[in-house]
Image: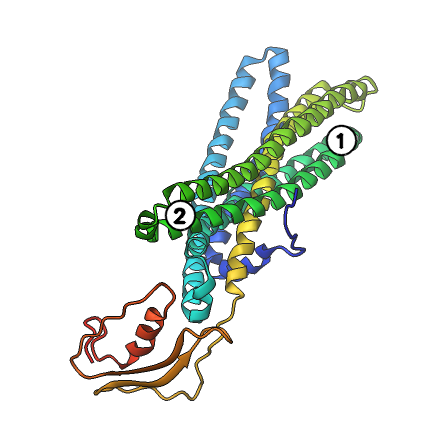
Amino acid sequence: MDLGFVKTRSSYRRLFPYLQPHWRTIAQALLCTLVFTGCWPLLAWLSGKMLGFLVQGNVLALARLAAIVAGIFLVQKVAQYGQDAGMAKAALAIALDLRKRVYQHLQTLSLSYFETAKTGDLSYRLTEDIDRVGEVVNKVFHDFTPCVLQLIVVFGYMVYLNWQLTLASLVVAPLIGGLIGWFGDRLLLISRRSQALISDLSSLLTEVFSGIRLVKAFAAEEFEVERFDREAERHQRAKYDAAWLKAVQFPVVGFLYALSVLLLLLLGGWQIAVGNLTGEEFGSYVVAVAMLIDPIAHLTENYNEFKQGQASADRIFDLMDIQPQVLEQIDAIPLPPVLGKVEYQSVTFGYSLHQPVLKALNLIVFPGEAIALVGASGAGKTTFGQSASPLLTNPSRGEF
């Protein structure tokens, strides 16, 4: 299966200039993230203490400790709110800035580009692709960063409790990480193919609906239905490839994680037997391990979404890299309002070399005249109107 060309450098790095205007919001949200993640090892430690009181049957001490844990949970959830609200605000603002910048760039491109560009593809890049990139930025701040920090602080606490047990329990980690990376790279290739196909499908719809009169005139409904079916089926197959890859990934990674938990129980029993770990400490250790399950699952899902979003980022910045073929001269003289007739004498014009749109055109339009341009698609009607529009004193009414 041909999955397309692979880019060696991620387009995500080009998003950094768009982060700078919103650094205050991002910094405030990150501060809340630090408070949120800093509560995890404290909660793991207190959970071990609570297990000890539970085994002893000390209900009073257990109740006091439970009240403290509830207070820490409250502080953590308030910090989580500040983190989520701030990151969402920054991500949406970044997506808005990017959409404005792309649209502004499109306005600078030459007419020759729009002669070959697909309207549906441009619309898809300005809407769906930018929305996907915005979702990825939100995920990085709202989910990915807190999960990474949670892994770091909880893992550090596990090392503090018993480094031998922590080192032994990491046997499966490199294998899990390698598998996640392999699945993510394959998903990126499939996502690029899928998004190119949906862009083609959108372009087809725009073409057909804008020319529906011609379709009806030539009784081409059946032909257009068959063409749409082919494009829709190609897109469906690409989407299924991505869904199938995810369906394989999660059971494989989940099974390896289950094996690592079983290994942890065996090694924990051994550490308690040799006196390197108490039952209360092992209980706290198990709670810490449980705190790793959710961020690992989220990171696996986020990695897949980042790879899918990278395809959208590539498409957006590919568009931004297109340069206009006709540039305004620095010393250009502004054209003042022009009154009088419009005259063309043997005018030949084309957007591409050796492909003229207007050929030896001779025309005189006197003030107040109304001119109707009639011709087949591509005959040059729009080109003539655009070339004449700077000479109109009232273009909206077609008056000279």
N-term-proximal mark, 2 vs 1: 1
Camera-side residue of 203 and 156: 203
Return the x and y of residue 233 as percentages of the image width and height: 51, 38
Query: Taking 116 as reference, is 187 left or right?
Result: right
Using the rendered image of the protein, determine whether residue 153 is visible from the camera's viewpoint: yes
Secondary structure state at the residue bearing disc 2: helix
Residue at 67% from the left image edge and 37% from the top image edge:
180
Quarter of the image where the N terminus is located: top right
Q: Which residue is mark 1?
A: 172
Using the rendered image of the protein, determine whether residue 134 is visible from the camera's viewpoint: no
Label 1, residues with CA under 10 Å away: few <14, some 14-19, many ≥20: some
Vertical comparison of 293 with 5: above or below:
above
Say whether marks 2 and 1 touch (CB < 8 Å): no
Camera-side residue of 34 and 10: 10
The image's mark for residue 205 is 2
Vertical comparison of 318 with 65: above or below:
below
Vertical comparison of 366 with 160: above or below:
below
Secondary structure state at the residue bearing disc 1: loop
Residue at 23% from the left image edge and 71% from the top image edge:
372
Q: Which mark is in front, 2 or 1?
A: 2
Quarter of the image where the C terminus is located: bottom left
Amino acid type of the residue that numbered disc 1 sits on in the rendered structure: Val
Snapshot quadrant of residue 280: top right
Amino acid type of the residue that numbered disc 2 sits on in the rendered structure: Leu
Return the x and y of residue 388 as percentages of the image width and height: 30, 78
Return the x and y of residue 216 as percentages of the image width and height: 31, 47
User: What is the CA distance from the residue labelled 2 to the residue labelled 1?
Assistant: 49 Å
Return the x and y of residue 143 as percentages of the image width and height: 53, 41
